Amino acid sequence: MIVVTGGAGFIGANFVHQWLAAERDPVLVVDKLTYAGNLDNLSGLRGDPRFGFAQVDICDRAAVAGLLAARRPRALVHFAAESHVDRSISGPGEFIRTNINGTFELLEAARAHWSALDGGDRAAFRFLHVSTDEVYGSLGEADPAFSETTAYAPNSPYAASKAASDHLVRAYHHTYGLPTVTTNCSNNYGPYQFPEKLIPLMILNALEGKPLPVYGDGANVRDWLYVGDHCSAIRRTLGAGRLGETYNIGGKSEMRNLDVVHAICAVLDELRPRAKGRYADQIRFVTDRPGHDRRYAIDPRKIEGELDWRPAQTFEAGIRLTVQWYLDNTQWTERVRSGGYRDWIQANYGERLGEQARQ
Ligand code: NAD
Ligand code: TYD
């Protein structure tokens, strides 16, 4: 079996669904269930004998060690993290705790587990660390895309905490021989994404007739990948990635934020037209994010060449699937947008939109 940390979050849940549909091994999800973790994301799997769940904080080494000893996984796929840049700006502490200390505790538990395995099991064990392209910092318009040898230059507390976790994983391979592989992926979108991130926030605000808050001039560039393609890349890397290596994952789909928002509006105009006007009328330019990285772009040649991985979705197809998913799953969105969610929206956007109104 395999252990998946953070499996109740956006990418982790998509990964678990894909894994159980495509692979044989059972899965144990280890998740603390923070505001971003949601058992609804896994509800379709209740009753599946290959699926298990443990509500555990990865910082709790003894609890994780107990699970590893009892379940003897052949692999650990590590998604659990605090993941939202804006939250890392207003409250970095939790990012240090989970992303750095949590990864350290997990590595220690994994190292003890792996050291106690015998011959074949020990050789087959894998620790796959899921990371981000944000560790590389920000690109200028004409710079080449991030490759695996690009120097780390994280700019937000989120990116810095992920960079630190990547370095710990690297050191555990180099020093102790722990069989690790790290993936650094670009921005994901798709089903089950918590509506604090750009794409689901815009879809839901649009449908509710609320402003669509574009930070700064809207010309920041992200390299978008459909979440199912990220999950297929992780499965491929887990199966065939070389130990101690890092693999950049991306779909060669760079877009300016404003163009992403217009693309969402166009799909909504078609699938759920407004009574009057167009969704793009709701776009508002608001105060920029402090230290906002200008451009991310992934050079995926290593994973394409070595592991023969390619994304299956274009942005046009993926965004349509995503908008349709949010239209079809209104109960899910109502439930995740509880009291705590409203507090966050007020804290992050109250002033930004207020300033815009005063201009
Ligand atoms: P998410 O915020 O949706 O989910 C994170 C999950 O981790 C939640 O289920 C949460 O409950 C759990 N978690 C948080 N702290 C924990 C702790 N201390 N112990 C146990 N569980 C804990 O995040 P996501 O967008 O699914 O991202 C998953 C991983 O992928 C992260 O490591 C992130 O850095 C990385 N990543 C994300 C993107 C993206 O675009 N979302 C891109 C590249 C890499
Ligand atoms: P986000 O989804 O938070 O991902 P990340 O910061 O990790 O790339 O944001 C994606 C881009 O969209 C980023 O450039 C910030 C911008 N953005 C907005 O313009 N408005 C918003 O309300 C949000 C949440 C993000």
Image (tube, rainbow, N blue to C red):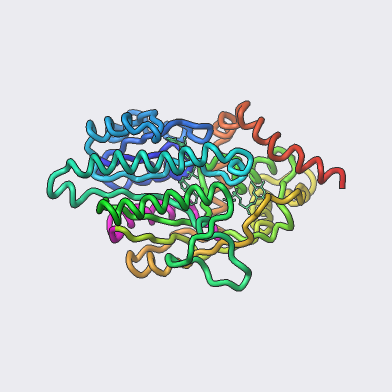
Residue at coordinates 48% horizontally, 54% vertically from top-left? 132
Q: In the rendered view, would you say 271 is above or below 332?
A: below
Q: In the rendered view, would you say 42 is above or below 197?
A: above
- Magenta-colored stretch includes residue 237: yes
Residue at coordinates 41% horizontally, 52% vertically from top-left? 166
- Magenta segment main secondary structure: helix
Q: Residue furthest top?
A: 339
Front one among 238 and 321:
238
Indicate the quadrant where residue 343 lies.
Answer: top right
Q: Is residue 142 left or right of residue 76?
A: right
> In this view of the protein, can residue 75 be seen by the observer?
yes
Q: In the rendered view, would you say 231 is above or below 69?
A: below
Front one among 292 and 280:
292
Q: In the rendered view, would you say 321 is above or below 256?
A: above
Indicate the quadrant where residue 87 lies.
Answer: top right
- Magenta-colored stretch includes residue 25: no
Indicate the quadrant where residue 358 lies.
Answer: top right
The x and y percentages for residue 39 are 45, 31
Residue at coordinates 46% horizontally, 35% vertically from top-left? 41
> In this view of the protein, can residue 327 be seen by the observer?
no
Front one among 48 and 137:
137
Magenta stretch in the rendered image: 223-243
The quadrant the N terminus occupies is top left
The x and y percentages for residue 162 are 47, 49
